[in-house]
Amino acid sequence: MRIDTEELIIKYKDDLFRIAFHVCQNKEDSDDAVQETFIQYHTSIVEFQDEIHIKAWLIRVVINKAKDLRRSGLRRFYIPLEEYMETLEFETPETKNIFYEVMKLPERYRMVIHLFYYEEYSIHEIAGLLKLSESNVKVRLSRGRKMLKKIIQEVLS
């Protein structure tokens, strides 16, 4: 199964951007990772079982592209998180604060929390996307939650 690239761009570009931003932490590299992901999809000859597998493939590729950009010498300067936050829209001040705190977590926890809570992937699916064991995903989720809980308690007190 193949879906037209333009249709996928319309449907998934924002999701892929958020995932790439969790890795790159700057807009330009995140945009590049998303663009390169769609180029790779468009030029690949891979046949997929269904749209769920296409989305999982896109997420895996965008994570790898973002990591490659982060490691490369062509990496762009970081935009302060506070400045980037001003460009985003949130439903409530609480969701903005939680997103801000999630973005401050180390990448290993930030990525699993994003995939679990924002993208609603199961632990099994996250393990496949990140090439980790399910127990490792559970540990990262647990540690990330503990870090967030501690930060939120400090803010509230």
Image (tube, rainbow, N blue to C red):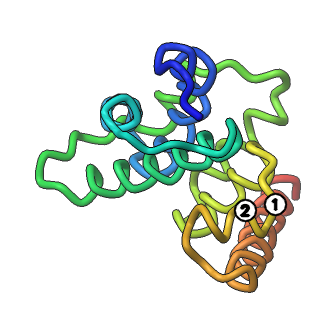
**Whole-percent x, y for residue 102 in the image:** 67, 52
Which residue is found at the position 22% from the left and 40% from the top?
76
Where is residue 56 shown, x and y percent of the image?
61, 48
Relative to 146, is 87 on the left or the right? Answer: left
Vertical relation: 137 (above or below) 79: below
Residue appearing at x 84%, y 35% in the figure: 94
Q: Which of the pair 8/141 is nearer the observer?
A: 8
Q: CA distance from mark 2 to mark 1?
A: 5 Å
Residue at x-position 77% and y-position 53%: 121
Question: Circle 1 sits in a helix, a strand or a loop, which is it?
Answer: loop
Local crowd at mark 1 within 10 Å, few (<14), some, or many (≥20)? some
Q: In this figure, what is the number of numbered marks?
A: 2
Disc 2 element: helix
Q: Is residue 91 above or below residue 80?
A: above
Which residue, given by chain and number where applicable, does mark 1 sit on?
Answer: 122
Please say whether residue 50 is visible from this viewpoint.
yes
Image position, residue 16 (x, y; %): 54, 36
Tell me which amino acid carries mark 2: Glu
- List x then y, in percent, for residue 138: 78, 78
Question: Does the rendering let one see residue 32?
Answer: no
Q: Amino acid at mark 1?
A: Ser
Q: Quadrant of residue 10?
A: top right
Query: How many neighbours does mark 2 have within 10 angstroms: few (below 14), some (14-19), or many (20 or more)?
Result: some
Identify the residue position indicated by label 2 in the image: 125
Check whether the beta carbons of the residues at disc 2 and disc 1 lie within 8 A of each other: yes
Q: Nearer the viewer, residue 138 or 102?
A: 138
Where does the N terminus fall, quadrant-wise? top right
In the image, farthest residue toward the left: 73
Residue 151's image quarter?
bottom right
Quadrant placement of the C terminus: bottom right
